[in-house]
Structure formats: structure tokens, C-alpha cells
Image (cartoon, coloured by chain):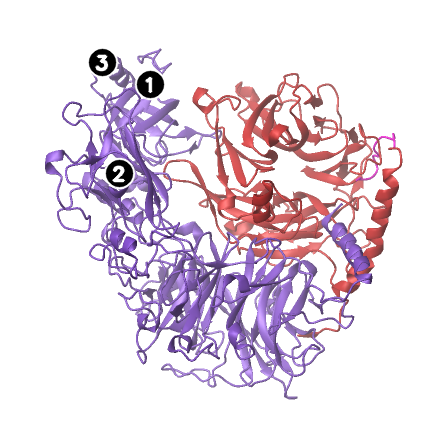
Chain colours: A red, B purple
């Protein structure tokens, strides 16, 4: 037992935040009357980081230039951070992209034999309305065929989420590698998706609709060929949708004409007022059905009914865990396996940590940007294991005021096996840095912030000491 | 601009606006409230001990307090905002309060998300804050708290034989821990006579919830205040139970009853079978209604001094309940005396149907009757209490608030095992009355043949429209759900339309067909379990295949047809759901179809063939219910005068419950290794009976009377509907054909549809203002305000993640609900 003295109250902590809020308000006010900068994106720091991904020993970070402090056309960037040394270092070979970058996905020959051109990072820019295929072998590069513009179809606006599907081997002559891009701005919120052939960069993407509601994020089950996706602006519903890609089908056609079957499961029947956001699939564990982890923002469903659309404000955020089992008729029948896990306001991306030892179900990382929290959920125990938010003593947001992007690194000596730690990288959107948390996969100890080289302060990649 | 910034600006604006205005009480500033507890303690708001509601304000890492008598916040010294009690770890998630039985301040403990630390809050003087912590991790490494409750401490550690005396000045905290463990920490009144402190160093007693290597996690805990010998634990795991005779360990799905009379750390347990895993639990002692009573008053219940019964109420795991499982979803009512579900008072089902709740039940919280009755009338005095659904006041003996994922808080009449209705199920004046609301025949375009139903009130007349058709469908309130039904001749079987199939040869020239698709990695996906009974496939059913491109099959016909000749057992590698052997249809107009069957019988495996399966005759399908059986025609000469399906000699079709425990099917649930399971025709018939019986369970006890309403009496004559015991079919009817002689077989897809309405309108309470979003209730506690304000009665406090607390009493009208923000 330990005794505890009085602590700063939240009102005190709120008072300490007030100058910051005012500063932001002033900055916004000043910004309204000033000309935007024409400078291209800096390549030595992050500006409103969004998407994060791992490639080998490199961390890839998408900067969004959200405040348009730099030129809109090339004010965003994809930067590479080497993690192998004592201190993570932002490399100077970053690639500039359009502003308002989105998600980033990595595809390489190791995970997708059909990719013969080498590893690529696939990243979207909402401002530039395109997908970038950035080469990852050697220095980052964006050469011929790197940019896939979506201007050919006037309906496509704000590309954001990126998914990858890969079938077969190029050497077998039957390889397929596709990038799937979702759009957040389309006429009548039509859920348009672009299918990009990664083996034929010159081809025009195929565009088709998933139904009402803009598609946000993707997750692919390579075992069953199901490509799952979440959506926003879906009306008074919260559909988890997927394309049944097993077999030979063309998703651009109707299912009765050789197209792929598109199915959905409405989570409103389980939780009124839910709007799905992030998505991740569980690791395959022998003997256990696959699960899907979904973050959902909650809003006032009654008000939405009155308005006929989603109100602008949230009422909370949750993590939903669904088991993916086929029913008697062979159709997927997702089943909620626990109460919605309360996370906080502004839930966004979700990432599954590497396979745990002993056949344990997964650990899952989730960010809540508005509440400034990183949460680690333990699906084996069915509860929240760790929360990183404000320091209870100082009120300092330990992973930034608006943690958003996530990437996970397997730190085990032989990644994928045995016990050890996983490192979760968290991008701080408003603060422009990336911090890291080490999570013991066995669950034997609490997760902890990764310290900087001085061993005292938390690691903050992108912040000059 | 993010939400916090908006909130900050709003505060500034509000502050500015306030400069010129009057005062007013500040709000609680709730952000994602996660837990709530009621305690007696001391604060700056009131002199001496007083009841308060503590709210875990998770989004702000604090506790805030509300005066439980006037619902006003306890203010901070600066009086511009409520008192904040910061917690030492982020996101407080659990709160528990309990009396030490000595008339002094209560224990209040908070636990944060992902933590094993019990944070003790000072309640005994106005310096309200966290004063000490007990970290359970030293005794339970790697654990986290799943649930926490308080329980009294027996005077002696091992009082047997049912004796129990709670020790004064002591109380236990029982924490369910991950990893299948349980921790008990005892608190006591300190030597100064006011403070509370953990006993010992503190002493943390941890035990494994395991038998050998088999363990279970407790996900919720409860104590019956009238019998605190047991701590009940809900679990989503099979609960291992050690044999008392040295036999093998048995496993039970349901609730564990931990014997708390033993020393902490050495509790043993039995298990109460709920037929499914459980996610939440509560316990109570009460009197239940008489099996044949529909009375609203005390006469409905076992007359005192009849011994009341102990009951355990458990929310069933939504992943393992429903029509595909041994029990429907809802809140199960368990009898700890038998270790089983309580008995069905209607004598039909082998167990009491669970209390039906819309959405997924998240928490169950039970309140006692008010200490001060609102009147001297017998029905208002304990053990009786009042509930007030919109249908009018009733007397009951126990009330539970059930928090649902649909955002509502339903209140259950535990004495009647139901959530009362807000509108009558029986009276015609009610817009939600159980009824057949629409019915029509749907002939095939151009055909001169229609289906109809034999009118029970006009023997020999085939009803094909209007009220005659409506009344020709028999329904049973409490069994009949809201659904739209179709009777279709050679209709498509649910879930088996436009699917993808593999077809191959069994080597003997006869083709097999399996609905399945090879996945990208080679494993088979979208596997329909044709060998199982759920899909309702029968031998002789019609298979429609698009075989264009298959050698030997018509190149220009979109569909060829064949018959289901036999069922083939599953093979894990090639046909994990089993298959059907295809036989020739023998349609003289289409000899090429039979040729195609021959061709398929000698071909290799062909994948991706579009396929649909149709019934060979009539099939009943409900939009929500799915496959519901195979009606047959009742020919005119044989129409019986027996109009009630509850009477002997009824010759119509009925979807009706039958004892599911007496129906053994090796394919339900689908076995882990189905290839080793044989199921012949008789077995398949039994399996189908089981599948249909599970779709015909009772889901509600109708405990209302027609009470002189003639329309009600006419619709539900007592001879046929002896509520509340009225058992009957989900739907029943006598199917007829318009021109049976001239056109004995109608065109395919000739159909008749009707729509049924359950009549359920579950009573719930919510904010009276639309300004509050009813999204995700998180926790509930009870408070008896009657000693302070007699008319306020018993109360529930419910926290909503959307940022408010609901204060209501089911004994009062819905418009008297209070919302605290």
C-alpha cells in the first residue's frame, strides 16, 4: 500500500491547457488572413503526421501538411525513419507528395510474390487526388508510374484509405496484386472504391460502388479472399462491408454477371449511433475463428434520425470485437464477442500486435485523438490492458495531444515467434512527433513508454532534442 | 478545430454570458462516464453522513459526486465546477461502494482501466480524495481487474449450514482478475473509529479459478444481499467443476456460485447451467407470480408467508445464444437451488425462457422495494413494490434495470420474468397488439392459380384476401415474432440463392455438388453446410445450375435443373460442409438437363458454378426467421372442422415448439469433425424438428387480461388462449389451392405472404429531452430515496458514455426522469 497526497485536479490541468488553446485560436485567426506558403514540404520533420507503416527496420511516416503551412501541391511528405541505430533518425531521402496525406500501406515481394518491381509504399493524398506508389528499395523514390491520379473520374474525391490484395505468384503466371483506395468525398456519399493494378501501373483503375457511404479503411483476409472495409456517411446504419474475392470474379460487375459478391453486416443492430472508422483483422490462430477489430465513433442516433444525417459531434468512441465465422449457409455471420470496449473520443486507426506466444488472442492498439489517448486492448482477457494519456501528475499528454497514426514492430529475436515485446509507434497529429510504447506480448508486465537516448525522457521522433 | 477546443471556446462564451446573468449550478462536466456507485459519506455539501452518487468520469480521469437526494453536484471549493477527485491512473473504469455495517461512512473504491490497483477514496470526512492504494499485481502478476464488487464478511470464516452473520465494521472487495483468478481484500474501520483501511499489510488473497489446468475468467460478479454466502460469477468460458466423487471434471456454461463462507483464497464453487456463457450477473430473493395468474396486484404472487425463492439473473453471451443455440438470447433466470434454469411455469419448455431484451443486455442491476412505501396499500408495502409501464401500475416483487446496447434502459418485472409492455399486446385498441397485420396471395403473372388459406370461421371457404385471409393465420402472443412470411411453391431456400458451387464426380458417374469456393490460399470458403439441417434441404429438392461452358451441358441455357438425390457426408479436405448427389430431373421437355447431369458425373471438379436450390413443394420462409418448414396442401374434402391448432385433429400446418431436449441431432451444433457423423433419413428428420423447435420458442409471458374488453375476448378466447400459460404455434394455417382439380400444381413461385406483429413494446426509461443522446449506457446503481422523499421511491442511476447520468424510478411516470449532465 502506498499513501498518496493531493494531486492536481483536472480543473488545474485544464487551466494549464488554456494558453495552448488560445495560442491555437490566435494562430488560426492569423492564418486566415495570410497567403499560403509556396515552400515545398520539409524533409527533416513531420507536419501533422497521419499514416504510419513499418518496412523492415524503417518506419514510414506520412506528413499531411494539414494547416497548409507549406505548398498544397507538394507540402506533404513520406519520410523514412531508420530504427536500427541507437536513436531513430529521419533520413533525407523523403518524398514529397500532395497535402492532406492519408493512410500508407506497404507491399513487398516477401508478402506478395506477384510484386516483381520491388517493395512499394502506397500512400494517398486528398489534395492531389491521387495514389503514390513510392519505391522502397534503396532510397525512397517516386519515378515513372509512381502517381496514379484519380482525376479521370470526376466522382472521385479525397482518396484516403489504402488496402492491398495479393493472389498467387508472378512466376506462376497467375499473380494478382491490387491496391484498393477508398474516397471520402463522392456524389451522394456513394461508396466508391478504385481498384489499382499494381502489376500494370499504366492501366486505368477500375471504379465501382460498395453502396451508400464513403469507404474509409480496408483489411484483407488472404485466407478467405475477403476484403473488408469501413465507411462513413452511411446514413442511419453502420455497415461492415466486404467483397468476396475468392474464386474468379470481377468486382466491377454484378454478382450475377461474373462479379464478386459484396456483402455487409450492419452494426447498428448491435450499437445504435455507431460509425465505423479503423479496422484490423486478428492474427490467424490455429483452432480459433478469425476476428475483426473495429473502432467506431458514436453519435446521437436520435438526433441523427431527426436530422436525417449524422450530427457533427460525437458522443464517444468504442472498440468493437467481432468473430468472423461462416454460418450454415456459408455466408459470413459476424458476431459481437464482448460488450463494446469504451475507448474515448476521436477513435481512429486500430492495429493488431504480432502473434502472441501460447496461442493467446491478440493485443490491439487504438488511438483516440480527441481524448489524447493510446489504448492497448487485450483480446485474450477481454479488457483494456494499458492506457497512455495524460500524465496523472503533470497533465502532460504522453503520446501527444492528438495521437492518431499507428505502426507496430515485432521486437522478438525471431519476429513472429516466441515471447518478447512489440513496439507500437504512435504519431502525434498536432504535435508533429512520433512516440513509441513497448508492449510485452505475453502480457506479463505493463506496457511502457520507450525512452529517448538519455534514458529519462520519452522518445519523441521528429522533435529536435 | 477539435472537440476540446470547441469545448474550451464554449466555456469562454458561457463564462462571458454568465457575467451579466444570475448564478446557477454548474454541470458535472461529464466525459465518457464509465461507472457509478452509491455511498454514504461526508462531503462539504452536507453536514454528517449523507448519500451520494459517485461517478467515474473516465474522460477526465476523475470522480465526481452528486447528492443522491437532490441530484445536485458536490461543488469544488471554487464553486464554479463540481468537486473533482483525481484518480492515480487514467480512465477510472470500476467503482464499488459498500457499507461496513456499522452505520458509519461507506467504503468507496475505484479501479482504472487496465489496472490492478484498488484506490480507496476517503468518504469519512470532507477531504474527499484517493488516500491509499492496494496493488493486486504483487499477488497476481500480469492480472487486470475484470469486475469488482463488495461483499460482507462473515463473523466466522467458515459458517456452514446456511448460517451467516455479517461482521460489523468490515467488508470485502472481491475482484475478478484476468487469467482465471480471483482476489479478495478486506477493509475495516480504523482504530480512530471513522477511517477505513485495508486489513493487514494489506492482505491480498488470490486464488485460481481452476480445476487442474482448466480455468475460467469471471467477467462479472454479484452477491444476493439476502444470501451473501455465495458470490456469483458470470463467465464466457466453460466453468470447470471438480467432481465430488473423484470423477472427471465437468464443464458448465453459465454462472459459477463461489462459496464465500470459506476462507478467502480457498473458495470452492458449483456451477449454474444457463445453457450458454454469460456476460453479466445479478442475484435476488423474491416471490414469483403464480403460474396461472395474470393479476396486476399482490394476488399474482405466492401468498406470504410462503418462502421466497433465490434467483440469479445472467445476461447471456450474444455470441452463443439465439435460434442456433440451446437457448435464446436475453437474461436467463437461474435457480441456485437446482443449479439449473428456473422451471417454465407454462410447463412447455424444459426451462424458463430468458427475459427478452431488445439489443444486447450489458448490465443487470436490481433494486429492493422502497423502505418507505408510497402508501399503506398492501401492494405498495414490502415485499411488494410498484412499477409503472405505460399500460398502468402493477405490483411486483423485484425490479431490474437492464442496460442495452441499443441505448435504452429497460426495466424488468422480475416477479413475472418479463420486461413489461408499454402498450397492450392483446387489446385491439393498442396499436402494437399482436396481430397478423397484412396478408395477400401472389399469383404468378398470367397464371390462373392462386394459393389461399381455409377460413376457420367459414368452413369450406378458401380465403384469398381481406380480413378472411388475415384471420386464417393463427398466431400465439408470446411465441409469434414480428416477421414477414411467405409460403412459396418450389420457392428458393433461404441462403441458397445465387451461390457458387463446386461440382465433381463421385466416381460412379453420379455428380456431387457442394456450395463452396476455393480461397486464394487454397482453403475452401463460403462453405454451405448442405449436410446439416439448418438449411432445410430435402431429398428431391430442385438444384438450378448455370453450367454454360461445361462440356456436355447446354451452351445457351442459363440454367439446367437436377434433383437432390442424396446427401453426402462432409470431408474436411474436399467438402467440409458435405454435399448433395445430383440426380436427373426427368423432365421430358428438357432432356438436355439430364444429359448435363451425366456429363457432370464424369467430369473433373468444376468450380464457380452459380447455383440455387428450390424446394420440391411448398416452403414457408420468414424474413427474419428463415426456413420455417414445408406446408402441404389441405384438400377441400379433408378440411377439418378443428380450427385450433391446439386441439387434437388439427390438419393444418404449424410451426410449433416441441421439447428440444428430446430431439437429439448429431449435426446440431455442427460437430468439430462432421465427417465422422452419420445421419440417416430418420436422423435428418429429427434434426429438422430440432431446428424448427428452436425457432418456435416462447419469448414472452403474456400476463395481462382482456378485462372486459370485448374485442380482446373475441380475438383471444380463453378456451384457446389461457394466458399466461397459453402455449401455441408461432404460426398455423391450412393451405389451399384455388383450382386444385383443374390445375393441381401451381406455377413455380406462386406464393402467399403475411406479416405478423409480436405486440412487444418493452418498457424503458430515457431522457425526457432530445438534447441527450441515448448512446451506450455503461453502468447502473440503485438508491432508495423514499426515506428522504417518500414519493420518489426507489431509483436507478445509469451512466451513459455519451456524457450524462439518468436518474429514474420505474415506479414513476416516464416524464419524471431526471438527467444529470
For the residue labelled by badge 3, is the local secondary structure a helix, a strand or a loop?
Answer: loop
Q: How many marks?
A: 3
The structure residue drawn at horizontal position 24% and vertical position 17%, both measured from the top left corner, is B594
- Residue B666 position in % (x across, y down): 27, 46
Residue under circle 2? B469
Q: Are marks 1 and 3 on the same chain?
A: yes
Q: Chain of mark 1?
A: B
How would you classify the magenta stretch by its main secondary structure? loop
- Alpha-carbon distance for marks 1 and 2? 35 Å
Residue beneath disc 3:
B589
Residue B149: x %, y % from top left: 53, 70
Magenta residue check for A42: yes
Which of B208/B187 is in front?
Answer: B187
Residue B446 vs residue B176, the one in the foreground: B446
Of callouts 1 and 2, the N-terminal one: 2
Give the secondary structure at mark 1.
loop
Residue furthest bottom in the image: B192
Would residue A245 appear left or right of A214 to someone viewing this image?
Answer: left
Comes first in the chain, label 2 or label 3: 2
A47 left or right of B371?
Answer: right
Q: Earlier in the sequence, mark 1 or mark 3?
A: 1
Please say if the residues under marks 1 and 2 sit with CB atoms less than 8 Å apart.
no
Q: Is residue B610 above or below residue B495?
A: above
Residue A450 higher or lower than B151, as above or below: above
- Which residue was labeled with disc 1? B559
**Residues at circles 2 and 3 in contact by the CB criterion of under 8 Å:** no
Q: Are marks 1 and 3 in contact (CB under 8 Å)?
A: no
**Which quarter of the figure has residue B56?**
bottom right
Q: Are marks 1 and 2 on the same chain?
A: yes
Q: Is residue B498 above or below residue B61?
A: above
The image quarter in which residue A277 lies: top right
Which residues fall within the magenta stretch? A37-47
Amino acid at each position: 500500500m502506498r499513501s498518496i497526497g493531493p494531486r492536481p485536479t483536472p480543473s488545474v490541468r485544464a487551466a494549464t491547457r488554456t494558453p495552448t488553446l488560445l495560442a491555437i485560436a490566435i494562430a488560426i485567426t492569423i492564418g486566415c488572413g495570410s497567403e499560403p506558403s509556396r515552400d515545398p514540404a520539409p524533409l527533416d520533420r513531420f507536419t501533422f503526421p497521419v499514416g504510419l507503416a513499418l518496412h523492415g527496420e524503417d518506419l514510414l511516416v506520412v506528413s499531411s501538411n494539414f494547416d497548409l503551412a507549406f505548398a498544397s501541391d507538394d507540402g506533404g511528405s513520406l519520410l523514412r525513419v531508420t530504427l536500427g541505430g541507437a536513436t531513430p533518425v529521419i533520413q533525407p531521402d523523403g518524398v514529397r507528395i500532395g497535402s492532406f496525406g492519408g493512410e500508407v500501406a506497404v507491399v513487398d515481394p516477401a508478402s506478395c510474390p506477384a510484386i516483381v518491381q520491388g517493395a512499394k509504399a502506397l500512400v494517398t493524398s486528398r489534395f492531389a487526388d491521387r495514389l503514390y506508389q513510392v519505391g522502397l528499395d534503396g532510397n525512397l523514390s517516386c519515378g515513372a508510374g509512381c502517381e496514379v491520379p484519380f482525376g479521370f473520374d470526376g466522382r472521385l474525391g479525397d482518396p484516403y484509405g489504402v488496402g492491398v490484395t495479393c493472389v498467387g505468384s508472378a512466376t506462376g503466371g497467375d499473380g494478382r496484386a491490387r491496391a484498393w483506395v477508398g474516397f471520402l468525398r463522392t456524389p451522394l456519399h456513394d461508396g466508391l472504391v478504385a481498384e489499382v493494378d499494381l502489376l500494370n501501373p499504366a492501366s486505368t483503375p477500375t471504379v465501382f460502388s460498395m453502396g451508400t457511404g464513403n469507404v474509409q479503411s480496408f483489411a484483407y483476409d488472404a485466407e478467405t479472399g475477403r476484403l473488408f472495409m469501413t465507411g462513413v456517411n452511411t446514413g442511419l446504419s453502420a455497415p461492415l462491408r466486404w467483397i468476396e474475392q475468392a474464386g474468379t470474379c470481377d468486382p466491377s460487375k454484378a454478382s450475377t454477371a461474373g462479379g464478386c459478391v459484396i456483402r455487409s453486416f450492419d452494426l447498428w443492430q448491435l450499437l445504435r449511433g455507431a460509425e465505423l472508422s479503423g479496422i484490423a483483422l486478428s492474427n490467424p490462430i490455429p483452432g480459433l475463428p478469425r476476428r475483426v477489430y473495429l473502432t467506431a465513433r458514436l453519435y446521437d442516433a436520435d438526433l441523427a434520425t431527426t436530422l436525417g444525417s449524422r450530427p457533427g459531434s460525437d458522443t464517444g468512441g468504442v472498440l468493437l470485437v467481432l468473430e468472423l465465422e461462416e454460418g450454415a449457409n456459408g455466408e459470413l455471420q459476424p458476431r459481437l464477442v464482448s460488450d463494446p470496449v469504451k475507448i474515448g473520443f476521436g477513435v481512429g486507426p486500430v492495429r493488431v500486435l504480432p502473434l502472441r506466444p501460447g496461442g493467446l488472442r491478440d493485443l490491439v492498439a487504438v488511438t483516440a485523438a480527441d481524448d489524447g489517448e493510446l489504448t492497448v486492448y487485450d483480446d485474450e482477457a477481454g479488457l483494456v490492458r494499458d492506457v497512455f494519456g495524460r500524465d496523472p501528475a503533470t497533465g502532460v499528454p504522453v503520446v501527444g495531444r492528438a495521437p492518431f497514426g499507428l505502426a507496430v514492430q515485432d521486437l522478438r529475436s525471431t519476429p513472429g515467434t516466441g515471447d518478447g515485446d512489440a513496439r507500437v509507434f504512435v504519431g502525434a497529429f498536432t504535435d508533429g512527433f512520433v512516440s513509441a510504447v513497448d508492449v510485452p506480448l505475453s502480457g506479463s508486465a505493463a506496457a511502457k513508454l520507450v525512452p529517448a537516448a538519455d534514458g529519462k525522457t520519452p522518445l519523441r521522433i521528429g522533435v529536435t532534442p | 478545430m477539435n472537440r476540446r477546443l470547441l469545448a474550451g471556446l464554449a466555456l469562454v462564451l458561457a463564462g462571458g454570458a454568465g457575467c451579466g446573468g444570475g448564478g446557477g449550478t454548474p454541470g458535472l462536466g461529464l466525459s465518457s462516464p464509465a461507472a457509478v456507485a452509491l455511498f454514504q459519506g461526508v462531503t462539504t455539501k452536507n453536514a454528517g453522513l449523507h448519500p451520494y452518487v459517485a461517478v467515474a468520469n473516465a474522460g477526465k480521469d476523475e470522480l465526481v459526486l452528486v447528492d443522491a437526494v437532490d441530484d445536485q453536484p458536490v461543488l469544488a471549493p471554487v464553486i464554479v465546477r463540481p468537486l473533482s477527485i483525481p484518480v492515480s491512473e487514467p480512465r477510472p473504469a470500476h467503482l464499488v461502494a459498500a457499507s461496513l455495517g456499522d452505520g458509519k461512512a461507506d467504503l468507496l473504491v475505484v479501479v482504472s482501466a487496465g489496472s490492478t490497483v484498488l484506490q480507496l477514496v476517503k468518504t469519512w470526512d470532507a477531504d474527499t480524495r484517493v488516500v491509499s492504494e492496494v496493488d493486486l499485481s504483487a499477488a497476481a502478476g500480469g492480472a487486470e481487474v475484470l469486475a469488482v464488487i463488495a461483499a460482507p464478511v462473515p463473523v466466522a470464516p467458515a459458517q456452514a449450514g446456511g448460517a451467516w452473520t455479517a461482521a460489523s465494521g468490515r467488508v470485502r472487495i472481491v475482484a475478478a482478475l484476468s487469467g482465471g483468478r480471483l482476489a479478495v481484500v478486506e477493509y475495516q474501520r480504523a482504530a480512530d473509529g471513522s477511517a477505513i483501511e485495508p486489513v493487514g499489510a494489506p492482505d491480498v488473497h488470490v486464488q485460481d479459478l481452476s480445476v487442474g489446468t482448466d480455468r475460467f475468467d469471471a467477467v462479472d460478479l454479484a452477491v444476493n444481499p439476502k444470501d451473501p454466502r455465495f458470490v456469483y460469477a458470470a463467465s464466457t468460458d466453460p466453468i470447470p467443476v471438480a467432481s465430488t466423487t473423484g470423477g472427471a471434471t465437468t464443464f458448465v456454461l453459465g454462472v459459477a456460485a463461489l462459496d464465500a463462507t470459506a476462507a478467502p483464497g480457498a473458495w470452492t464453487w458449483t456451477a449454474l447451467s444457463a445453457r450458454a456463457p454469460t456476460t453479466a450477473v445479478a442475484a435476488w430473493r423474491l416471490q414469483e407470480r403464480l403460474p396461472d395468474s395474470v393479476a396486476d396486484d399482490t394476488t399474482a404472487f405466492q401468498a406470504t408467508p410462503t418462502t421466497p425463492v433465490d434467483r440469479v439473473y445472467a445476461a447471456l453471451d450474444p455470441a452463443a445464444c439465439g435460434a442456433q443455440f440451446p437457448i435464446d438470447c436475453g437474461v436467463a433466470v437461474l435457480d441456485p437451488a437446482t443449479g439449473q434454469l428456473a422451471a417454465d411455469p407454462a410447463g412447455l419448455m424444459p426451462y424458463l425462457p430468458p427475459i427478452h431484451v431488445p439489443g444486447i443486455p450489458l448490465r443487470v442491476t436490481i433494486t429492493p422495494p422502497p423502505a418507505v412505501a408510497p402508501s399503506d396499500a398492501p401492494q405498495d408495502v414490502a415485499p411488494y413494490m410498484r412499477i409503472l409501464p405505460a399500460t398502468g401500475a402493477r405490483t411486483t416483487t423485484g425490479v431490474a434495470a437492464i442496460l442495452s446496447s441499443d441505448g435504452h434502459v429497460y426495466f424488468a418485472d422480475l416477479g413475472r420474468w418479463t420486461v413489461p409492455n408499454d402498450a397492450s399486446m392483446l387489446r385491439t385498441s393498442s396499436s402494437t397488439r399482436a396481430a397478423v397485420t397484412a396478408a395477400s396471395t401472389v399469383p404468378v403473372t398470367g397464371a390462373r392459380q392462386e394459393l389461399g388459406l381455409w377460413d376457420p370461421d367459414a368452413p369450406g371457404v378458401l380465403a384469398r384476401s381481406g380480413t378472411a385471409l388475415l384471420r386464417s393465420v393463427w398466431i400465439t402472443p408470446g411465441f409469434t415474432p414480428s416477421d414477414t412470411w411467405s409460403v412459396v411453391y418450389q420457392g428458393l431456400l433461404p441462403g441458397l440463392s445465387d451461390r457458387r458451387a463446386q461440382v465433381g464426380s463421385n466416381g460412379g458417374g453420379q455428380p456431387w455438388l457442394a456450395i463452396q469456393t476455393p480461397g486464394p490460399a487454397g482453403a475452401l470458403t463460403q462453405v454451405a453446410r448442405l449436410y446439416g439441417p439448418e438449411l432445410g434441404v430435402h431429398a428431391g429438392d430442385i438444384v438450378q445450375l448455370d453450367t454454360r461452358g461445361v462440356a456436355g451441358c447446354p451452351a445457351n441455357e442459363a440454367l439446367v435443373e437436377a434433383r437432390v438425390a442424396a446427401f453426402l457426408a462432409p470431408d474436411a479436405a474436399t467438402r467440409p460442409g458435405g454435399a448433395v448427389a445430383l440426380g436427373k430431373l426427368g423432365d421430358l421437355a428438357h432432356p438436355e438437363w439430364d444429359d448435363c447431369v451425366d456429363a457432370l458425373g464424369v467430369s473433373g471438379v468444376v468450380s464457380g458454378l452459380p447455383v440455387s436450390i428450390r424446394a420440391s413443394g411448398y416452403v414457408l420462409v420468414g424474413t427474419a426467421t428463415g426456413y420455417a418448414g414445408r406446408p402441404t396442401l389441405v384438400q377441400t374434402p379433408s378440411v377439418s372442422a378443428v380450427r385450433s391448432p391446439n386441439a387434437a385433429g388439427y390438419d393444418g400446418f404449424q410451426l410449433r415448439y416441441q421439447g428440444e431436449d428430446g430431439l437429439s441431432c448429431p449435426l446440431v451444433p455442427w460437430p468439430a469433425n462432421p465427417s465422422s457423423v452419420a445421419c440417416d433419413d430418420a436422423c435428418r428428420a429429427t434434426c429438422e424438428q430440432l431446428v424448427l423447435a428452436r425457432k418456435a420458442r416462447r419469448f414472452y409471458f403474456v400476463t395481462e387480461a382482456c378485462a372486459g374488453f370485448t374485442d380482446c375476448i373475441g380475438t383471444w378466447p380463453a378456451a384457446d388462449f389461457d394466458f399466461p400459460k397459453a402455449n401455441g404455434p408461432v404460426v398455423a394455417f391450412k393451405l389451399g389451392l384455388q383450382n386444385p382439380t383443374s390445375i393441381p400444381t401451381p406455377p413455380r413461385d406462386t406464393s402467399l405472404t403475411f406479416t405478423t406483429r409480436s405486440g412487444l413494446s418493452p418498457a424503458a426509461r430515457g431522457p425526457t429531452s432530445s438534447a441527450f443522446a441515448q448512446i451506450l449506457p455503461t453502468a447502473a446503481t440503485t438508491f432508495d430515496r423514499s426515506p428522504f422523499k417518500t414519493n420518489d421511491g426507489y431509483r436507478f442511476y445509469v451512466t451513459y458514455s455519451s456524457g450524462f447520468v439518468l436518474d429514474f424510478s420505474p415506479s414513476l411516470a416516464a416524464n419524471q426522469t431526471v438527467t444529470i449532465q
